Image: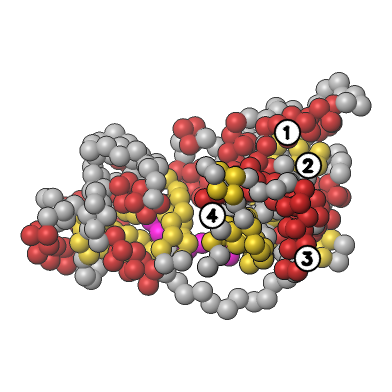
Amino acid sequence: MSLPTLAIVGRPNVGKSTIFNRILGERVSIVEDTPGVTRDRIYGRGEWLGQEFAVIDTGGIDLGDEPFLSQIKDQAEIAIDEADVILFLTSIEGGVTDADQQVAQILYRADKPVVLAVNKVDNPERRQDIYDFYSLGFGDPLPLSGVHGIGLGDVLDAVLAAFPKAGTEDEDDSIKFSFIGRPNVGKSSLVNAMLGENRVIVSPIEGTTRDAIDTKFTANGQEFTMIDTAGIRKRGKVYESTEKYAVMRALRAVDRSDVVLVVLNAEEGIREQDKKVAGYAHEAGRGIILVVNKWDLVPDKDNHTLQEFTDHIRQEFAYLDYAPIVFVSAKTKQRLGNLPAMIGTVSENQNRRIQSAVLNDVLVDALAVTPTPTINGKRLRIYYMTQVAVLPPTFVVFVNDPDLLHFSYERFLINQLRKTFDFSGTPIHLIARKRK
């Protein structure tokens, strides 16, 4: 299930990037008091009252002839098309402008739920000035101070209320997986090779695939849903609005997937962008398989080449030490037949549940092998462990003080779980809580 999406839209210099950063709780967008600084959509995840959602920051919509304004308008309109709810941001400074009216006209045509907010209401005495914004035709304007965060809760309450309600969907027992990776690593070729047909366009030109495409097939009695996505490129190297749109579709495909296949190009080797692409799936808690494509094109292979490449991957992707690695060729179909079984195994591990009694036997053995550390004269005490979730497997350990659980000992406990149970291909989340 993909996350609901909020797009922040408005004319330049009303504080969209400031609000975006407030929602995400971190400084992601460039903030500068100059109109038009944010020229591209930037994506992130927000959370309010337990509800996660995707957030799109956009360049300001302006219909003038200044440089970049045409491209910014295109970017914003694509973001509007992708969004479930639109936060129409205006500013108390200058009141309702002609540009605000023009943005409103675009939003009328979008036919999407709109939450109207008036930013830069830092002085409570100016709250009465927001009534002028009723003229935009989007109901009650909500006062907001992006600098101080005042009023943001009311705005997010309205956003959550406007998100589409989760409906009942048809039961789908298929395992959903997606190929992700930077452009031209052979994702579409892998789709076609696995299906034995030309399901999607294949081209050596980077960025051919624009949309996520779902295809169902059955292998070994198990039904799969395969999602092909557009390649993810460095933000600074993406100029086409359609290509940026494809990045968003790829990230949403990750959200919809049970297992993500991170495709690497054996011929070109590992690039820094490969790590960032894999990071999207890792942070989302999805099952991961590292697929090294174009293995047939690696020259002068010998008995050591595969192991050397594997060691290099483990070094470069240290945070994915749990992910299996498979070397394939879309052209020759080498080892492609192994992928469905691997995907099924990773999906099974993502859904694995361990009884609390068994978990605590493992915990007792782990504590006997490596006693808990002492920090500043205070020893960590672990009383109990239980599993609270799957997708990914999530465990809670009850301790005397969560601050004493150092990341190194947390990693030790996770490794003990991996040694005892098959969690290959899936991240494990460990949460420390104080025993009351």
Give the residue type that dot 3 points to: Val
Q: Earlier in the sequence, mark 1 or mark 4?
A: 1
Q: Secondary structure at mark 4?
A: helix
The residue indicated by pointer 2 is 325
Q: Secondary structure at mark 3?
A: helix
Toward the top, the furthest residue is 300
Instruction: Name the one closer to the observer, 38 or 422.
Output: 422
- Residue at 51% in and 74% down: 166
Q: CA distance from mark 1 to mark 2?
A: 9 Å
Q: Earlier in the sequence, mark 3 or mark 2?
A: 2
Q: Secondary structure at mark 2?
A: strand
* Numbered mark located on residue 355 in the image: none
Image x and y of residue 76, in percent: 37, 50
- Residue at 20% in and 61% down: 143
Give the residue type that dot 1 points to: Ile
Give the residue type that dot 2 points to: Ile
* Numbered mark located on residue 313 in the image: 1
The residue indicated by pointer 3 is 358
- Between label 3 and label 1, give the one nearer the viewer: 3
Report if residue 152 is visible in the image.
yes
Instruction: Name the one closer to the observer, 28 or 82.
Output: 28
Q: CA distance from mark 3 to mark 1?
A: 33 Å
Image x and y of residue 172, in percent: 69, 72
Instruction: Name the one closer to the observer, 47 or 272.
Output: 47
- Between label 2 and label 4, give the one nearer the viewer: 4
The span picked out in magenta is 1-7
Q: Secondary structure at mark 1?
A: helix
The residue indicated by pointer 4 is 402
Image x and y of residue 231, in percent: 60, 42
In the rendered structure, the answer to whether residue 431 lies left or right of residue 17 reads right
